[in-house]
Image (tube, grey):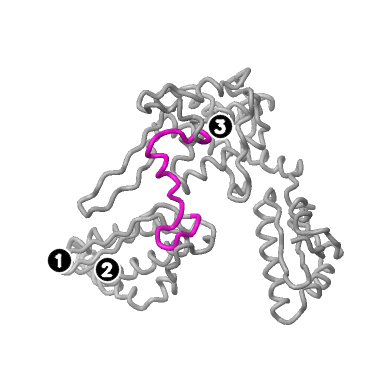
Amino acid sequence: MSEPLQYITLTAPDGEIIGYAWTDGTQLGLVDRAASSSAAYKAGIAWSNRMQDAHRRGLTPAGVLALFSHEPGASPVTEAADMAALEELARIVTPADDQRLLDQLAPAGHPSWRELAEAYDALTDEDRDVTWGGGEKSPSGAIQMPYPVYSEPLRRVVRALNEVGAVTPEHRWMDNPMPEVPADGRLMTAADAVRAATAVVRGERFSEGTIAHAVKDGLLDAVVASLRAWAAAQGSTAGPAPSAPAAPAPAHPTAPSVPSAPTAATTGPARSAPAPVAAAPAAVCRHCGGFPAVNVAFRAHLGLLFFLRFRRMDGPVCRTCGLALHRGFTTYTLCWGWWSPLSLVLFGWLTLVRNLLAVRRVERLPEPGPAVTGGRFDPGVPVHRRPLAYVALIPLCWVLTLIVAAVSGGG
Ligand SMILES: [Zn+2]
């Protein structure tokens, strides 16, 4: 696209640039700033929705821009050479963007900094040598996805990164490149350390093995060293910042369980470990191929007198397919999951709770990209709008009646 564009700059009340609404004469769009705050990002969506509404009601794209350019927070209509020029503008990271990330960090002297220092210093070579579990065949014939087995000390470091505030929704890691490990052991800026910590820790939920990868290539070391240096410079009482980040040394822990890895180093960026890593990027939906996806299982239960049936569908699923599975399976369980003694006291509840936990992870996903393999499920209406779900009221009322009778009967 090298057509000249018209655009208006959208600015939040605090002066932060939200993004740029543009038109090439036929289309209307918004380029948001990948480095913007979460509030600005949401404001951008609201602007975009309102502008699309106006367009649908018959205004031309240029008319929409002209109209909205008079609103508070919008600039006059301006011209850009082409789309690339606008995207260049949107990539600018301002000092205010960096500062916003630093504002998420615990103040220097907060106990969480000491915890981070202690947790990190306690890491051993064994903790750094992340192994992979899974891969076994279950009786039903399904092969369990391989998953990284993180040691407790390594989990403690990850928790500490959360506690110092280095993992934050203010960094939209999916829209931004991963900060690189600085060469020759230099420190990252603290803002970049926050970006990297967020991308690694959040990324683990979407693609298991992200933390293992960061441990291996020294990114985790660089993040912790940079954050500790920042805290120390703020006058922290936390453990002393390491004089030079120890990144290079532990970046290659001797890995006895990984045969022939060193010579394979030329094959790709640090992804030289054997089989398990190859299976790690399981981040596409198994039903529609959409990205991102999260590995969760949804369950359904049927209990009729002495007949019990358990259904289970394993992930990874995208947000749309996950919601569809949750609604279908949960409604089924609400209807059929109560009619045996064990179901009523245990399995019905267990199934519902596990589905709720799973759907909470699914709901944290953004909308998936295009369905690559077709077959995306239709989520349909929510559970509370499905009549079958209300069958659950019958056994629940009955149980309630029993309890009330027992209590009022003095027993
Ligand atoms: Zn899907």
Q: Mark 1 or mark 3, which is nearer the start of the sequence?
A: 3
Q: Residue 50 vs residue 166: left or right?
A: right
Q: Which residues are magenta?
A: 268-292
Crowding at label 1, few (<14), some or many (≥20) Cα neighbours within 10 Å?
Answer: few
Q: Is 279 part of what is drawn in magenta?
A: yes
Residue 400: give its label. 2
Q: Residue furthest top?
A: 243
3D distance between C-alphas at marks 1 and 2: 24 Å
Which residue in the protein does label 1 denote?
A: 307
Say which of 256 and 65 sits in front: 256
Q: Residue at x 29, y 75 (%)?
A: 391
The quadrant of the picture occupied by the C terminus is bottom left
Per the image, the residue denoted by label 3 is 219
Residue kind at label 1, given as amino acid type: Phe
Q: Which is nearer the N-term, disc 3 or disc 2?
A: 3
Mark 3, other Cα within 10 Å: few <14 / some 14–19 / many ≥20? many
Query: Which image quadrant: the N terminus?
Result: bottom right
**Residue 127 in view here:** yes
Mark 2 Cα-neighbour bin, 10 Å: few <14, some 14–19, many ≥20: few
The spot of residue 34 in percent (x, y) is 67, 51
Quadrant for ligand 1? bottom left
Q: Which element is circle 2 on?
A: helix
Q: Secondary structure at mark 3?
A: helix
Q: In the image, is 192 to the left or to the right of 371?
A: right
- Find out whether residue 32 is within the magenta segment: no
Q: Is residue 186 left or right of residue 300?
A: right
